[in-house]
Amino acid sequence: MNIAIVGATGNVGRKILEVLEKKEVQIENLYLLASSRSVGKKISFNGKEHIVEDLEKFDFSIVKIAFFAAGSSVAEKWAHVAAEKTIVIDNSKFFRKDADIPLIVPEVNPKQLTQVKNRNIIANANCSVIPVVVALKPLHDLYNVKRIVISTYQSVSGAGKGPMDELLSQTQDYFNNKELESKNFTKQIAFNAIPHIDSFLENGYTKEEQKTTDEIKKILDKKIKVTSTCVRIPVLVSHSISVNVEFDKKCNLDEIRNVLSTSPGCKVIDEHKDGGYITPVEAEDKFETFISRIRLDESQKNTINMWIVSDNLLKGAALNAIQIAEALIKNDFYGQ
């Protein structure tokens, strides 16, 4: 099978290559694409160097799947062009709200992949939404989720390489007693927490918070009530999410732990002792969605609290995209 990766030189593009290697996906020909300024760069894959090609000159008819990992502006301009000749799996936010395009997390809503026939484009969900719905799907099947209150603690890698470099440089400048300069964030990010991701809307929420609501409803169930606060924290990789979940039915903690422990993509680390939980550092480079601190909300009937941690560059982006491709291959591209 021939595949292309658009944005191969970026954080997510490189992670896609890492996951393809780890999962030993059988690829006949691999094409790495980027803008003209990156053309000619060499990237190693499976011990062989591949030269980055010009996106604008590429013929997508020679590949079966094209992974887009280059942001919304590139997806807006090129995804439709590619989709005329191949299947596009897009990691940007550009197509997520489109009713004709499936928004897929394979453990949660794989049946919606049949909608790929609509436009030949599949959207990858938001990097903080994916671990939430992976953890909530088995509980929704069990008790029917009524309402969720979400607080995300998102790493700087979710904003790209520049923000990662800024966290590192600000940290260094802090210890050298230099003035801290903020280019990628509205406030100092080193040793700080910023309750602001993406631009503000008229209702007072940010676009990131609105995306959280919209995507959970589209993927899991439109009847679920959702409210969220999204915070950027000085962590390089992995997003953490505190979730308060209200069910329609009486819930049992042992049953919840058991069902999550046996659900695809989930790993429960929940011991009521020092260190009996997962932090962002421990989740980095792991495929699983980790769930800790499962406990009853004693202030609200039929309600629990959970702590969820996931590598945002893997399950939140590259890994989920490849799992979508694997589901397509398994189902023979739904007759295409």
Image: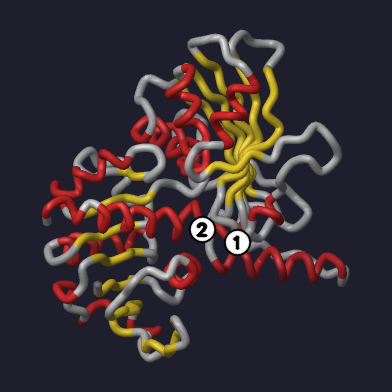
Height in image: 313 above or below 41?
A: above
Label 2 belongs to which residue? Answer: 314
Residue drawn where x is 58% and y is 60% of the image: 157
Q: CB atoms at circles 2 and 1 under 8 Å apart?
A: yes
Q: Quadrant of residue 323?
A: bottom left
Left of 212 or right of it: where is 75? left
Q: CA distance from mark 2 to mark 1?
A: 7 Å
Instruction: Judge whether 50 appears above or below 336 on screen.
Output: below
At label 1, the amino acid type is Asp
Q: Residue at x 57, y 25 (%)?
A: 149
Please give left or right for residue 182 compared with residue 175 in the image. Answer: left
Q: Where 302 sits versus 99, above or below? A: above
Residue 138 in sight from this viewpoint: yes
- Among the 4 quarters of the image, the one containing residue 301: top right
- Report the residue at 32% width, 50% height from top: 123
| Secondary structure state at the residue bearing disc 1 | loop
